[in-house]
Image: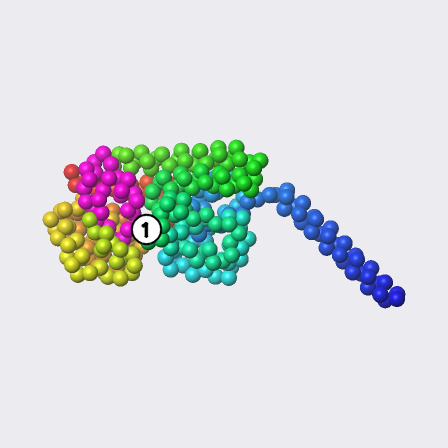
Amino acid sequence: MTKKLRNFLLFASALLACFSFSSLKNTVQAASDQINVVSTLDFYGEVAEAVLGDHGKVTSLITSSSVDPHDFEPTTKTAKTVAKADLVIYNGAGYDDWVTKLNPKKTLSVASLMNVKDGDNEHVWYDPETMSKLADRLVTEFSKLQPENKATFKKNAAKYKKSLTKLTTLLDKIKKNSNNQKVAVSEPVFDYSLQKMGYKISNTHFAQATEEGSDPSYSDIRKLQNDIKNKKIAFFVQNTQSDSSVIKNIVKLCKKYGVPVVKVTETLPKGKTYVTWLQSEYQAVLKAQSSSK
Ligand SMILES: [Zn+2]
């Protein structure tokens, strides 16, 4: 009996300790009240950070330019980070859909936001309009979690969207001199920007092959070589993050025939923000325009 009673008391006090500990933990959590966001890609994480301000934290999963997001393999640590997030932002359209298999509480596909489906060009961040739409959508999502901060989220999003006008101004400036000209690309990475600039892509079939990691067909290479030699393209866009010998030879040929080469990357370079990154690439297009005049 005594033993039973003692056991009961021990159990009761343990239970009590548990309760007071968990209620203490709850108060601490409520006091900090941070929205926990995970983004597969760092440039989307940047938008989330801008909209959240100090009401949450953002963890981006792919932050190194040496990692090809097409081939990213999530680890156990990645899975744990994803499971803890209130919202997971990912590109979608087949680009980083592995994240949806890691039991996220809630996901937001940027491609779906832009009505881009599986099989369409998935590099949607190369349209600055995407970031603007994402900022607006994040205001809605974060306001569901913290209605009391809706005004702050709105204000933060407006400020972020204003920073994008640096890019739209450049796009308009480029468009004035693009005259529906043709350009060629190593991969479809930069296409959404090129469309906004008013350029036509002359080698989509070639570019798709590089994107898929295979060599373009002989006739596709031949056609591109002729377009360069006959100056049928305004410039060539090279994704410097992929190193195929076919592309290296094309770049050499461009240099030989005085066709400008605009260098772009698939992922955000170190030390740059989304705006400064695209700004420098758009400047390179402007430079290519003036050199071919
Ligand atoms: Zn890609």
Q: Can residue 236 be seen in this view?
A: no
The answer to which of 255 and 142 lies nearer the viewer is 142
Left or right of residue 216, residue 45 in this image: right
Q: Residue at x 52, y 33 (%)?
A: 151
Residue 216 locus on image (x, y percent): 22, 59
Tell me which corner region of the image, top left, top right, bottom left or bottom right, holds residue 35.
top right
Q: Which residue is drawn at 19% across and 44% down?
A: 182
Tell me the kind of residue under disc 1.
Asp
Left or right of residue 211, residue 64 in this image: right
Above or below: residue 110 compared with residue 250: above
Characterize the local packing of mark 1: few (<14), some (14-19) or many (20 or more) Cα atoms within 10 angstroms: few
Q: Farthest residue in the left direction?
A: 230
Tell me which corner region of the image, top left, top right, bottom left or bottom right, holds residue 27.
top right
Q: Does dot 1 land on a helix, a strand or a loop?
A: loop
Residue 196 shown in magenta: yes
Above or below: residue 278 compared with residue 64: above
Left or right of residue 106, residue 246 in this image: left
Left or right of residue 62, residue 178 in this image: left
Q: Is residue 196 visible?
A: yes
Q: What stretch is highlighted in magenta?
A: 175-201
Above or below: residue 171 compared with residue 97: above
Q: How is the image coloured?
A: rainbow
Q: Farthest residue in the right direction?
A: 2
Q: Residue at x 23, y 42 (%)?
A: 199
Q: Is mark 1 within 8 Å of ligand 1?
A: no
Tell me which corner region of the image, top left, top right, bottom left or bottom right, holds residue 98.
bottom left
Residue 96 locus on image (x, y percent): 41, 55
Q: Which residue, given by chain and number where applicable, does mark 1 sit on?
A: 120
The answer to which of 239 and 20 lies nearer the viewer is 20
Residue 36 locus on image (x, y percent): 54, 47
Q: Where's the C terminus, which quadrant?
A: top left
